[in-house]
Image (cartoon, grey):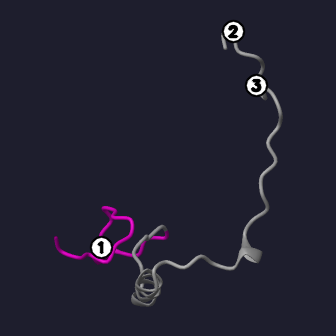
Amino acid sequence: MRLKHRMPPWLADAAFGHFSNDRRKTHREIDTIVAWVDASAPAGDDRELPPTPNFEEGWTIGKPDVV
């Protein structure tokens, strides 16, 4: 398979203009991902995690007819 340097793949072709939603990765971004994978994908700093979500108890959209 030919490496196309697109993540995720999409159909727009940069040869036909600039796209504001261009998903292609720069070589620097690719190098960063490759270095992270080569390092066995270490976890980041736990202090940077988003807060744990709070979930409501019970049914949030009304009780269903059958449970």
Magenta region: 1-20
To which quarter of the image does residue 1 belong? bottom left
Q: Secondary structure at mark 3?
A: loop
Residue 67 sits above or below residue 7 on the image = above
| First reached walking from the N terminus: tag 1 or tag 2 | 1
- Asked if residue 41 lies in the magenta stretch, the reply is no
In the displayed structure, 13 sits above or below 45; it is above
Front disc: 1 or 2: 2
Q: Residue furthest left?
A: 1
Q: Residue beneath label 3, please? A: 61
Foreground residue, 45 or 17?
45
Q: Position of residue 52 (x, y in %)?
A: 77, 57
Q: Say which element carries label 2.
A: loop
Residues packed near mark 1 inside 10 Å, few (<14), some (14 to 19) or many (20 plus): few
Residue 55 location, x and y as percent? 79, 42
Identify which residue, 32 or 4, lies in the foreground: 32
Quarter containing the C terminus: top right
Residue type marked 1: Phe
Earlier in the chain: of badge 1 and badge 3, it is 1
Say which residue appears at 69% left-offset and 9% top-offset.
65
Majority secondary structure of magenta residues: loop
What number is the disc on residue 65? 2
Q: What residue do we see at 79% from left, 62% from top? A: 51
